[in-house]
Image (spheres, helix red, strand yellow):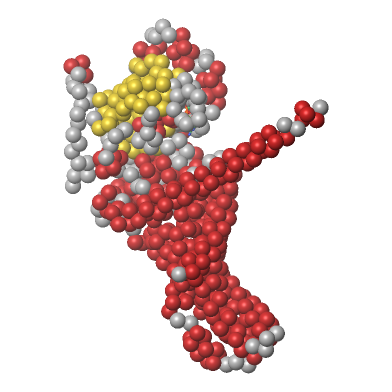
Amino acid sequence: MTDNRDPIIPVRFIAFVGQRSIVAARCIRSGVEELGLGTTLFAECLFWLGFGKYRHQTVRVPTIFEQMMEIGIFAIPIATVLSFAIGITLAMQGIALLKTFGAESQVVLAVALSVVREFSPLIMGILVAGRSGSALAARLATMNLSQELDALRSMSINPVRFLVTPTLIATLIMLPLLTFWSDIITLAASALYTWNQLGMSFQAYGVTTLGILNANHIMHGLGKSAIFAVLIVIIATLNGLFVSGGAEGVGRATTRAVVLSIAAIIITDMLFILLVTQS
Amino acid sequence: MNRHPPFPSGLPNSPDNKEKERIIEVENLVVQYPGNPEPTLKGIDFHVYSGEIMVIMGGSGSGKSTLLRQLIALDKPNSGSIRLFGKNIVKIPPLDLHDLRLRMGVAFQGGAMFNSMTVGENLLLPLREHLNLAETQMEIMSRMKLSFVNLDMSTLDKMPSELSGGMLKRAALARAIVMDPLLLFCDEPSAGLDPAVSAAIDDLIIKLRDALNMTIVVVTHERTSAFKIADRITILDRGEILKVGTLDELQNSKNQRVQDLLIGNAENVDVNAWL
Ligand SMILES: Nc1ncnc2c1ncn2[C@@H]1O[C@H](COP(=O)(O)OP(=O)(O)OP(=O)(O)O)[C@@H](O)[C@H]1O
Ligand SMILES: [Mg+2]
C-alpha cells in the first residue's frame, strides 16, 4: 500500500506548487496589466491637456478650479487638525525618546526632517486618497452604471478629458500645496509642545528649524506628494471605469481604489527613499 | 453659422430608392462579447431611410441594446460595417466621428441624465461643449427643447433625481435633441410608464419626425407604441433579423415566429410585456 501511495505525494506537491504558481502568475499578470492601463490613462490625460483642442476636446480651466476647491480648499480644516495632532505626537515621542540620551533639544532636528520629508506627504496623500480618490472612484463607477459615461461619449464628450483630466491637474496642484500647509502646521504644533515642555521659544524653534531645512528637503516632500497625486487619481479612475455589478460594485470599486492607492503611496514612498538615498 | 459641416455622402443611389436617402446602412454585422459561446448579433443587414421612424423590436436578450450601442459607435463590432450618412463608423477617424456625433442624439433607456447637474445644465452641456454661442442664446435653445417635450420651465432648476419617470424620459429626449440632430436614437422611450404618459411620448416622437424631419431609430418592447409610431419595423430574434417591413407587411407575413412576436404569443414576449 505504501508503495502505491508514496509516488502520489510528490505528484500532489508538484500539483500544489503548480496551482499556486498559476495563481501567482495571474496576479502578476493582472498587476502588470493594470500598470499598463494606468500608464496609458496618464498619457491620455496629458494628451487631452496638450492636444485636446485639436480634437474639439478642450480641458476647461473652470472645471480644474472647481476640482481644486473640492480637493484642496475644502480639505484644509481636516488637514489642519491632522497635522496639528501629528506635530504634537512627534514632539512628545521625540522628547521622550531623546531624553534617554539627554538630548531633548535635538527634537527640533528630528521633527523638522521627518515631518517635511515623510509625515506631511504621507498623511496628506492618505487624506486625499480617502477624501477625493474615493469620491472620484464612486462618481465614475456610478456614472458608468447609469450609462452617464455612454451619454457623454454619445455627445462626443470624452469622459477622460471631461472628468479625469481636470481632477488629475487639480490634485497635482493641490496635494503639494496641502503638504506644504501641513509642513507649517505640524512644525508649529511641535514648536508649541516643545515650548510647553522645554521652554524653547517659538522664535528659537523657528530659527533652528530653518537652519536645518533646505530647499532640497522641502522639494523632496513636495515632489513625492506630486507622485502620490498621480497615483491616487489614476488608481481611482481605473477602479471607477472598470466597475461591474450594480450598487455593490460601486462600493467594491471605491474600497479597492482607496486601499490600493494607500498601498501604492506607502510602497512608492519606500522606493522613492531607496532611490534618493542610494544615489 | 454652419454647425453641420457638409458631409460627403457616398450613398449608393440605387434606382428603386432614388428619392429616399439611406441614412443608416448595416452590413453583415457580427458582435460577440468575450466569454460568450455564441455571437450576440449574427450577421445583421438592414438600412434606415431618411425621415422615417424605424422601430427595432425583439424579445429580451435578442440583442437590441447591443445593436443600438453599435449604431451609436460606443462599441466596435467583430466584423461587418455600419454606415451613418455614408461614413463607415467602424473605421472612422476621431474628428469625423466627432462631426457625426454632433448630428445625432441619443435618449438612453434610464435617461442617463447627469445626476450632479440640474436639468437645465444637462441640456446646456452639449451646447456649451460644442458651440461657440452666447450663454443667453444657448439658454433659449434649451428652453425651446424643454417646451417641445412639454416640460414646465421650472424643471430647468430641478435635479434629475427630483423628476418622475415620465418627466425624466422627456428631459432625456429634450437633451438628445438639444443640438438639433438629424438622427435620433431612443432606447425604450416608453417602457415602464403608464399608458397615458407612454402615449404622450409616442406622440412626441412622431412630432419630432414631422416637425423637425428627423430620422429616428427606436428600440422597444412595447408592441402598442411600436405599431403606433413605426414607419417600418425590424424584428430581431436571437441575434438575427427575422423580418424588416411596414406593419402591414409584417402582419401579412407567413412566418409563424413573426406572427407570434407580433401578437405576443412567444414566451419571451409575454415576459417582456410586464417589464
Ligand atoms: N457587456 C456584455 N458582456 C457579455 N454579454 C453581454 C453583454 N451585454 C449583453 N450581453 C449578452 O448579449 C445578449 C443580448 O443582450 P442585449 O442587452 O443586447 O439584449 P436586449 O435585446 O437589449 O434585451 P432586453 O430587452 O432585455 O434589454 C444577452 O444574452 C446578454 O447576455
Ligand atoms: Mg436592452
Q: Position of residue A26 (x, y in %)?
A: 55, 42
Q: Nearer the viewer, residue B131 or A1?
A: A1
* Side (left or right) of B13 relative to A134: left
* Side (left or right) of A37 relative to A257: left
* Side (left or right) of B161 relative to A150: right
Which residue is outermost to the right? A1
Image point (64%, 77%), residue name: A89
- The total number of labels drawn is 0
Residue B22 to residue A131: above or below: above
Residue B42 to residue A189: above or below: above
Q: Position of residue B68 (x, y in %)?
A: 39, 31
Residue A218 to residue A142: above or below: below
Q: Quadrant of the C terminus of chain B?
A: top right
Residue A197 visible: no
Q: Position of residue A268 (x, y in %)?
A: 51, 61
Image point (41%, 41%), residue name: A150
Quadrant assignment, res B244: top left
Q: Nearer the viewer, residue B121 or A270?
A: A270
Which residue is outermost to the top? B254
Image point (56%, 72%), residue name: A119
* Side (left or right) of B92 relative to A246: left
Residue B39 visible: yes
Image point (45%, 81%), residue name: A214
Q: Position of residue B90 (x, y in %)?
A: 31, 33
